[in-house]
Image: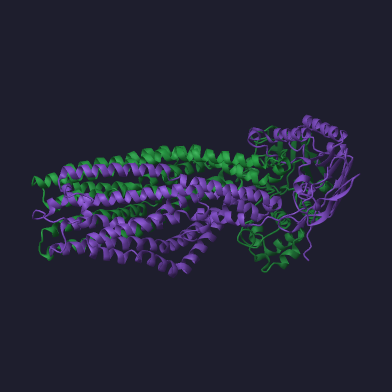
Chain colours: A green, B purple
Amino acid sequence: MRPLWRALADAQVPRGRAALGVLTGTAALGSAVGLAAVAAWLIARAAGMPSPADLAIAAVVVRFFGIGRGLFRYLERLASHDTALRGVVSLRVRVYERLAAAPAARVLPLSRGQIMARLGADIDAVGDAVVRGLIPAAVAVLVSGIAVAIAAALVPVAGLVLAACLLIAGVGAAALTLRSARAAATLGVRAEAEVTERALAAIESAPEHRVWGTSAQALAELDEAESESARAHEATARPAALAAAVQALAAGAALVGSIAIAVTHAQDGLIGPTTAAVVALLPLAAFEAVGAVPAATLQVFRSAEAARRIEELAPVGPAHAQDRSGDPTPAAVRIEARGLRVAWPGVAPTRPVSFTVDPGEVVAVVGPSGIGKTTLLATIAGALEPAAGQALIDGRPSLEADLGTIVAITAEDAHLFGTTVLENLRVARGDVSPEEALDALAGVGLAPWVEALPEGLDTVIGSGGGTVSGGERRRLLLARALLAPQPAALIDEPGEHLDADGRQALRAALAGLRTQGRSVVIVTHDLALLDAADRTVTLDD
Amino acid sequence: MRPLDPRLVARIGPARRYVLITAGLGLATACAIALQALVISRALAPVLAPSPLTEDGLGWLGTLVPVGARELATALGWLAAIVAVRVVLVWVQERLAHRAGVAVVADLRRRVVEHAARLGPRWAASGEGTAVTTTATRGLDGLLPYFVRYLPQLLLACTVTPLMLLLVLDLDWISAAIIAATVPLVPLFMVLIGLLTRDRSARHLAAMERLAARTLDLITGLPTLKALGRERGPASRIRDLGDAQRRATMGSLRIAFLSGMVLELLTTLAVALVAVTLGFRLVYGEVSIETALAVLVLAPEIYLPVRNVGTHFHASADGLAAADAAFEVLETPLIASGGDRPAPSLAGATLSVEGLTVLTPDGRRRAPDTLSFDAAPGRITALVGPNGDGKTTALLALMGLLDADAGQIHARSAEGTTALVDVDAESWSTQFAWVPQRPDLGVEGRTMSLGERERAALARALDADRPVLVLDEPTAHLDQASRAAVVAQITGAAAAGSTVIVATHEPELVAAADAVVAVEGAREVAS
């Protein structure tokens, strides 16, 4: 649970608004309890055939509670959602800032899906803890307290019985639900992942199964995963069913006990008929609030898991030391690899390579996929420690702080933002002028493309905007690299989608970088491009 | 979204039993609750009545619970028994409820997978195919609440609510009239509110989704910004977008929660009205205390199923969207291709490819573009060229797994020449021993690394004794030593008479080939 509390503290959930949510929620369910109590009083009083005027106030109160439940519930839902949304906004900013300040070695390899899951769905889940977990739980405690107080004020022993039963219904159900949630989190999640994997494998590898006659086998494996998932459902249903039964039992026991106490007290003349009616009928409405406890427990459990995953991605802690204020950024640098072997932690390192790149030079790194070309770029940029040898910038080992100041990386899957063409180029440098942007676009052969766009540089592209083909995307990224202020450019070029035009654009971009006096390292599969480089380094052994 | 999707109901099949069991248990619970209301009124009436009770206030229903229940001991016995029954009912219901959904969802997913597999690699690789299969496989679990909660509650709303209303009618027709007049107001008002707010809520929802998408777009660009040293800027932009999104969301919630409020307002207010009316009628002796108590306890239970239907329908929304995606897959027609003649034996036949052209799923490129080559038995034919230019696609087309947009594939042997399009595709395909880039070797392959899987798949291909060996980058994930071994194995297979076709970047493998074919793609010229 601790990561959840830390996340909520981090989210700065506004306390006043949260309290308002609890208060209106209590008023809503309290209205239901009040309605039951006052209606019981009204009926009992009316049975004594008093003057109708004696019922007037009670009749008004009953109607008030009748309206209050719906009205307060509406206000509670608005208050709690607003609270949670505010928390979610703050938390998202906090986690983003922490992630932005995290070491590049942790940030660069993150996939879009990973970021989306953690900063999107998981942060929303932390917000859900407020709306569906904590506020309903607090309301359950308060409403139960109110019901117990009413009963205890009338007949103390009835209050005691009601309190005991509510406690069992709340705590017992929470404990059993937690057991069910754990089973679901281990067995259920694994089984579900297995089902998805088998299902997608059966679809994606369908041609292979057709050739080898294994289609039936692939479906049989899916069936097997489904039965495993059904078993997981059974395992989670068992404690959940017990929790529901415990709640029903506690509510029933409270009803039987209260009626016994009310009737015997009334028969002994200890209490009047109106008190007896209230004490006897109160339990019928008092258990609605604790009824929300299993769902609330489940939500808190899920939110805690989400908070744990967020913490794993972006741990709370002292900000990552990143000193970029030191030396002024040089206008030109020399990049050097000396017996450099690179690897992500836990992966076999590449064979050693040595090369130098002087300002205005282009070095091409070649080798088949998965051999570590991208890793090499990350190491040169200082994001990753060399596995062996040295990566040097102007003769000194490259540092984490060099990334973004001296070195810019254009990743193969770099992001095009859902904004205008110009703003997408300004990602490289904030003060790019429209003229500079057009120059850079012309440099990668995109001049006709941008002219054809409905609003030129101000056309929105990317998600939510006009679509960009794979080749246009690559060239936009190259234009971005041309505009970046860093003296060293590391470009990770995908081997695919490079047709003749694309190759020509890349050549032109490399020539542009050369005349700017930049030191360029480019990673490529495309052997046809090697003549555009001054030197070639192969990672293949 | 419809309240009852006939396509889903039609597929309930084996789960029908569990939906009915769940609804049956709900009905039994409702009966127990009704009985409990009668017992409570019997037990309390004597202590609340100003003078000893003479009449039976429960009318015809009084026969269900004997007047003897006015004695406390008897009443408590009845109540304890009813509570025990309710506890068991709840337990059994929660224990079995999920079975109503699990089987249907599994069955639906299996059909989707089977159908999608038959739709072929081109459909699966198209944007639509990937998106739809992902929703239809991953999202279908969201359908569980529909079968487990919503459908049984719908059945209950159609049975329990009228049944309880009949009970109240038997007790006191005026209260029954009040309730009967308000119950239809619930769906009426909800539909009305839905209609009146539709435009506004659609606008809010659209704004909310747009802002959410922009926030996520900004956030997912973090590695790119980091690589350019520009990661600090967007934090304040993320806060602004988030605040705007919060305002849009609250605007849409203010409307969305209205229908919930009306639901609660109508149902609770109706109960309050019933209570107040009963109170004043008691004063004038128009109704007995026993009757009044029974009606008071029963009134909220009449509305319960109606309220639950609303709640559970919203919980099923995601699942219903996934179900739509699933039906979209199932309704995509299969394209019949090929003839019904069995294919000739490909042993000793030369495979001839002429002008083979396949459009990429997005229709923007031709990969491969007018590819022609002959693959002769006993020889290694290597396909080379950049990734994405159609080497794998050419292999798929050659094996009859994918229909070409243009071009022909023939098998030429001493017996004559046969076109692939004229023969039964399966009898053609199963003569190939294929090693794909990422072989799926089933459950046993799961623990292997990609390299191990590739070697196992190659072993399967070499042992299969099929006339044509097709290898797609067989050495991509292997080290130097294994690569040499694999090249030796491939040359051995060719020497033994197999027709070998291999797509590769590997210089050693290209050097070992008898013929090298360059595969090239081209931009599709819009006609």
Percent across and percent down for residue B308 are 38, 55
Looking at the image, which residue sits at the far right? Answer: B414
Residue A182 placement, left or right of B329: left
In the picture, residue B175 is in which quadrant?
bottom left
Q: Nearer the viewer, residue B410 or B24?
A: B24
Whether residue A320 is visible here, answered yes or no, is no
Q: In the image shown, does A92 or B97 lie closer to the viewer?
A: B97
Q: Which quadrant of the structure image shows residue A253? A: top left
Give the x, y percent position of residue A114. 58, 46
Q: In this view of the protein, can residue A390 be seen by the observer?
A: yes
- Along the line of sight, the residue nearer the viewer: A140 or B168: B168
Q: Which of A222 and B6 is in front in this view?
A: B6
Is B522 placed left or right of B82 in the picture? right
Figure quadrant of residue A394: top right
Up the image or down, A454 lies above or below A350; here it is: below
Residue B112 shown left or right of residue A77 in the figure: right
Q: Residue at x 64, y 50 (%)?
A: B116
- x and y percentages locating residue A267 in the rendered image: 10, 46
Tell me where residue A123 appears, x and y as whole percent: 49, 48
Residue at (84, 36) in percent of width and height: B508
Left or right of residue B465: residue B70? left
Count of numbered circles in the view: 0
Quadrant, the C terminus of chain B:
bottom right
